[in-house]
Amino acid sequence: MNSLCSGWLVLPDVLRRQLWQHARRAAPQECVGVLGGQVLVSGPNSVGWEAVALYPLPNVAPDPLREFLAGAPQFVRSLAAMRLEGLELVGIYHSHPRGPARFSGVDQARAAYPVPHLIADLLGGELHAFALPQGGEIRLLGVRPDEVWPDEL
Ligand SMILES: [Zn+2]
C-alpha cells in the first residue's frame, strides 16, 4: 500500500459502463473524458470522491493511437456544465487500447489536476485509478462506503 494513501473514488456502475463504452467506441485510439461529482472526505491521510456524471471529450492529440489530449474548448465547457450542476472535477479518464492498466511516464508528467486519473486497459479489461503525479493507486468503489468514511473525517 502506498504511504501517500491516495484515497478512493465512488464510480457507480452506470458511469463505469459509459466509460467502457466510450473506450471501445474510440479504439484503436485512446479516449479521454472527465468525471463530475463531489469530494466526500478530505482528511490528512485520505481523500474520497464520488462521481455522478461523465463527460466524454474529443482526443485531439497528434498521435491519438498512443496519447491523449482533451479538446480545450470541450474541456472548459464540461467544467462549466459541472458548475451549473453544483459539481466539481473529480476525475480524468483515458484508455490504453493495448494496455496496460498503468500510467505511462507521459501520463504522469502531464497530470495537471489533483484528482483521480482513471486508466481503462481495453486489452486486459481492467480499470484502475491513480493519484498523479505521485502515482499511488486510488480504490474504485461501486457505492459510497458509509461504513468507512466517518472514521476518515
Ligand atoms: Zn496513458
Image (cartoon, grey):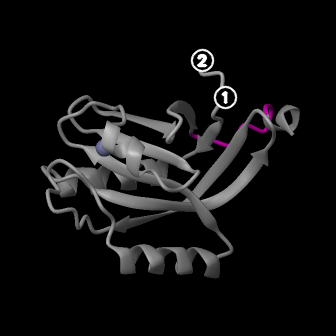
User: In percent of the image, x 32 and y 72: which residue is there?
Assistant: 71
125 displayed left or right of 54: left
Q: Is residue 125 left or right of residue 4?
A: left
Q: Is mark 1 within 8 Å of ligand 1?
A: no
Amino acid found under the numbered disc labelled 2: Met
The image shows residue 31 at horizontal and vertical percentages of 27, 56
Where does the C terminus fall, quadrant-wise? top right
Q: Quadrant of residue 36?
A: bottom right
| Disc 2 CB within 8 Å of nearest ligand 1 atom | no
Secondary structure, magenta segment, majority class? loop
Task: Report if residue 73 lies within the magenta region.
Answer: no
View extreme (top): residue: 1
- Residue 147 is inside the magenta segment: yes
- At label 2, counting other C-alpha atoms closer than 10 Å, the crowd grade (few under 14, some 14-19, many 20 or more) is few
Figure quarter occupied by ligand 1: top left
Q: Is residue 11 visible?
A: yes
Residue 14 position in % (x across, y down): 47, 53
Q: Which of the numbered marks, if any, corresponds to residue 24?
A: none
Instruction: Locate the N terminus by quadrant.
Output: top right
Q: Tell me the magenta residue range.
A: 142-148
Mark 2 touches mark 1? (CB < 8 Å): yes
Residue occupied by mark 1: 5
- The three-letter amino acid code for the residue at tag 1 is Cys
State whether residue 78 is above or below residue 17.
Answer: below
* Residue annotated with mark 2: 1
**Mark 1: few, some, or many residues within 10 Å (few <14, many ≥20)?**
some
Say if residue 12 shows up in the picture: no
Residue 34 appears at what percent x and percent y? 45, 61
For the residues marked 2 and 1, what is the alpha-carbon distance in whole angstroms? 7 Å
Query: Residue 95: percent from the left, percent from the top?
Result: 29, 46
Towards the viewer: 96 or 114: 114
Disc 2 element: loop
